[in-house]
Image (spheres, helix red, strand yellow):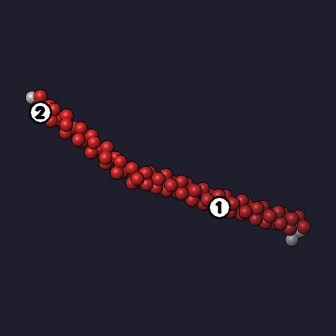
Amino acid sequence: MTPEERELLDKSVRLGEENNQILRSMRRSQRLASIARATYWIIIIGSAVGAFYLLQPYIDKVKNVYSGANDVLNSFKQIGQ
C-alpha cells in the first residue's frame, strides 16, 4: 500500500468515525425530543383530566341550580296557562 493510499484510507476512517459520532448525537437528540414531547402531552392531558375531576362537584352544583331554575320557570308557565 502506497503512502497516498494509506493517507486516503486513514482520512476515510476518520470521516467515518466523525459521521458515526454525529449520527449518534442526532439519534440521542431525537430520542430526548420524543420523550419530552410525550411528557408534554401526558402533562397536558393529565392536568385537563385532573381539573375536570376537581371541578366536577362544582359543575354538578351549577347543573342542579340550572335544572332547579328550569323547574321553577316551567311551573310559572303552567300557572300562567
Is the C terminus in the top left, top right, bottom left or bottom right quadrant? top left
- Horizontal and vertical percent for residue 24? 68, 63
Secondary structure, mark 2, is helix
Which quarter of the picture shows residue 2?
bottom right
Going by the numbered disc 1, the residue's amino acid type is: Arg
Q: Is residue 59 left or right of residue 75?
A: right
Q: Would you name the residue on which mark 2 appears?
A: 78
- Residue 5, image x and y in percent? 85, 66
The foreground one among 33 and 65 is 65
> How many neighbours does mark 1 have within 10 angstroms: few (below 14), some (14-19), or many (20 or more)?
few
Identified at 49% across, 52% down, the residue is: 44
What amino acid type is highlighted by mark number 2?
Answer: Gln
Regarding residue 39, the answer to whether it shows in the image is yes
Q: Earlier in the sequence, mark 1 or mark 2?
A: 1
Badge number at residue 28:
1
In this view of the protein, can residue 45 be seen by the observer?
no
Label for residue 12? Answer: none
Q: CA distance from mark 1 to mark 2?
A: 71 Å
Residue at position x 12%, y 28% in the image: 80
Q: Which residue is outermost to the left?
A: 81
Secondary element at tag 1 = helix
Q: Are marks 1 and 2 in contact (CB under 8 Å)?
A: no
